Amino acid sequence: TNFYKKNIAVVNAQGKESIIGIIKTLDLLRIKWRVVVDDDFLDMKKTFLPVCKHLMLDINESKQELRKHLFNNGFVVLKKGETENLIPIEDIAEMTGKTINQIVELMALRPKLSEIFEKELFKKSKPEIAFAIVDYYKVKFNSPFDKLIKWMSDD
């Protein structure tokens, strides 16, 4: 997807705490926004309460209901941890040259796949890893991010 052709910018919020400030700023400027957050967003009251308040959502609803209401308001709360968890383990093995068994062993040691990517598999910074992933999927006809990208770029 060529986001620039649709006048779309991808912004790294530098942490969940910054999301509400970015949303409020974009709302003031009347700029449409979409947000993708990791699964733990709903466990972090410090970050999710201000968002729910801003969107006038009932924080006492079940996680499933909150996910649905957040989605209807421009949020995707990932169901499988982090964005890295969307990538099939076979693709991770192909990208990194590690075996599936090696990756499974690493995943048993560290709960966050993003840390495994940085410290064990790619041994690069997050932006460098992102570029490696983009390059990998550029030559394939589909990626685990296709539906998410379509949702982000739909009007």
Image: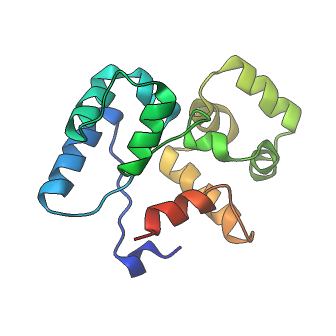
Residue 95, position in %: x, y? 75, 52
**Is 121 located above or below residue 44 in the figure?**
below
Front in this rendered view, residue 37 or 76: 76
The residue positioned 43% from the left and 21% from the top of the image is 43
Residue 123 appears in view: no
Q: Is residue 109 left or right of residue 74?
A: right
Residue 41, position in %: x, y? 42, 30
> Which residue is outermost to the top?
109
Front in this rendered view, residue 138 or 78: 78
- Looking at the rendered image, the quarter that the C terminus falls into is bottom left
Residue 70, position in %: x, y? 39, 42
Residue 81, position in %: x, y? 58, 32
The residue positioned 34% from the left and 75% from the top of the image is 7
Q: Quadrant of residue 153?
A: bottom left
Front in this rendered view, residue 80 or 67: 67
Q: Quadrant of residue 98?
A: top right
The residue positioned 83% from the left and 31% from the top of the image is 102
**Is 139 located above or below residue 123 in the figure?**
below
Q: Is residue 106 left or right of residue 69?
A: right
Q: How many marks?
A: 0
Residue 149 appears in view: yes
- How is the model colour-coded? rainbow
Q: Is residue 33 left or right of residue 88?
A: left
**Is 24 located above or below residue 137 in the figure?**
above
**Is 119 located above or below residue 92 in the figure?**
above
> Which residue is outermost to the left?
28
